Image (cartoon, grey):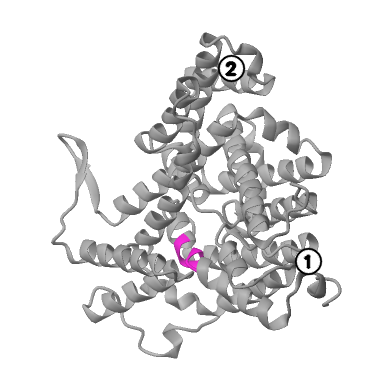
Amino acid sequence: MKKYFQFEELGTNYKTESIAGLTTFLAMAYILFVNPATLSAAGMPEGAVFTATAVAAAVGTLTMGVLGKYPVALAPGMGLNAFFAYTVVLQYGIPWETALSGVLVSGVIFIFLSLSGLREIIINAIPGNLKLAVGAGIGLYIAFIGLSSAEIVVANEATLVGLGNLRDPNVLLTVFGLIAAVVLLIRGVKAGIFYGMILTAIVGMIFGLIPVPQGIGDIVGTVPSLAPTFGQAFINFGDIFTVEMLIVILTFLFVDFFDTAGTLVAVATQAGLVKDNKLPRAGRALLADSTATVVGAVVGTSTTTSYVESTAGVGAGGRTGFTSVVTAGLFLLALFFSPLLAIVTSAVTAPALVIVGVMMASQLKNIEWDRFEVAVPSFFIVLMMSLTYSIATGIAIGFIFYPITMIVMGKAKEIHPIMYGLFVTFILYFIFLS
């Protein structure tokens, strides 16, 4: 085991790697409760999604650790789960079973891209500024979802949206949870989001806003059945052959593809694993990520992707894939704590959505705002995701504006043919389907 994971070469040991694995798990354990809460809005059974979340995370993280040998953990991605529930299912009216088919197809395409070497072509086709805008836009989008689900932001007839009732006990509980998480993270607590959720739940129970567990059975229980979601991705598979579903699949693929690449580079750089400006075993790592998406779709959850919270484990000393092996084992152990879903209300999960949104929005600083030809499409991507309540729409509008602004600037030759293809595709989408 030590030889396989190169403990000596990387200067690590079982104790350090195990602590790192636990640290990573705690930093991202919130997804076990936030993902079921998010996908249940699309009509998916919460218990089954909880199990699917843990299984997809365990399989993906274990594959990354053993195959890619990176201290990177995976789980259903934030932002993509919101896109799945609020845009694909609730806004487009697509059944969640068909949406799972879209996730499955995107995962299969990702596997093909990982094996074929087409990854570099696609990465180079999408301008870096637009990639950054997509990540930041998703951050603002999921923060908006968190604030609205907690009723901090509410509908307003005069201004469309407005501030909620700050005297509402549940709204105040959400505000407390947000402040608690912010304080913990600022103080350097790696698992600040998770601990913030625990503190919020405890305070909620003290004030009678959240049910108090009456015994061990309300904390530890049997693993919820996967039957309601397992294999549903195959049932409506024939319904994916529409232009609308093509846009959905491309969005799943696009976000997962670049989010994974960015996370791998960030984690590997922090761990000192990048050599000659190259990522060792990058193909294996991408294959692990894409395989996890396929597994997640089959068991019943939205796109599974690499988590930037893995940097918490690296900060604790994790350097090898054994860190991921430990994290995967903890996700399997977490399967027995599904009864805790009853105390994880929107007031508990909303702060996590907002905090993750803050982290993702940090990419805004890297966009070249002084170049108006890229500032315009980047701005529309970020803005329109939240205003239209759709990640896909934001991407589409930005990708339409990009060729226009670049051509006007006399830079038509700098635009990759793939971007022209997406320009036409998105225009046709708005004409015939939007």
Task: Tell me the element at label 1.
Answer: helix
Using residue 273 as the reference point, say whether residue 53 is left or right of it.
left
Q: Residues within 10 Å of mark 2 (few under 14, many from 20)?
A: few
Give the camera-side residue of 354 and 331. Answer: 354
Q: Amino acid at mark 2?
A: Val
Q: Nearer the viewer, mark 1 or mark 2?
A: 1
Mark 1 to mark 2: distance in Å? 42 Å
Q: Which is nearer the N-term, disc 1 or disc 2?
A: 1
Residue 172 coordinates in the image, percent (x, y) = 21, 64
Residue 362 coordinates in the image, percent (x, y) = 45, 47
Give the image quarter of residue 3.
Answer: bottom right
In this figure, which residue is indicated by the disc labeled 2? 424
**Marking on residue 12:** none
Give the camera-side residue of 187 and 124. Answer: 187
102 w.r.t. 41: above or below: above
Q: Amino acid at mark 1?
A: Val
Question: In the image as oriented, which residue stretches furthest toward the bottom?
Answer: 215
The reply to whether the magenta stretch includes residue 154 is: no
Give the camera-side residue of 260 and 103. Answer: 260
The residue depicted at 72 percent of the width and 67 percent of the height is 62
Task: Tell me the element at label 2.
Answer: helix
In this figure, which residue is indicated by the disc labeled 1? 66
The residue depicted at 73 percent of the width and 76 percent of the height is 12
- Is any part of residue 49 visible from this angle? yes
Using residue 155 as the reference point, say whether residue 192 is left or right of it.
right
Using residue 200 as the reference point, say whether residue 325 is left or right of it.
right
Residue 302 coordinates in the image, percent (x, y) = 57, 52
Give the image quarter of residue 310.
Answer: bottom right
Q: Main secondary structure of the magenta part?
A: helix
- Is any part of residue 47 visible from this angle? no
Residue 135 coordinates in the image, percent (x, y) = 51, 42
Question: Which region of the structure is painted magenta?
Answer: 29-34
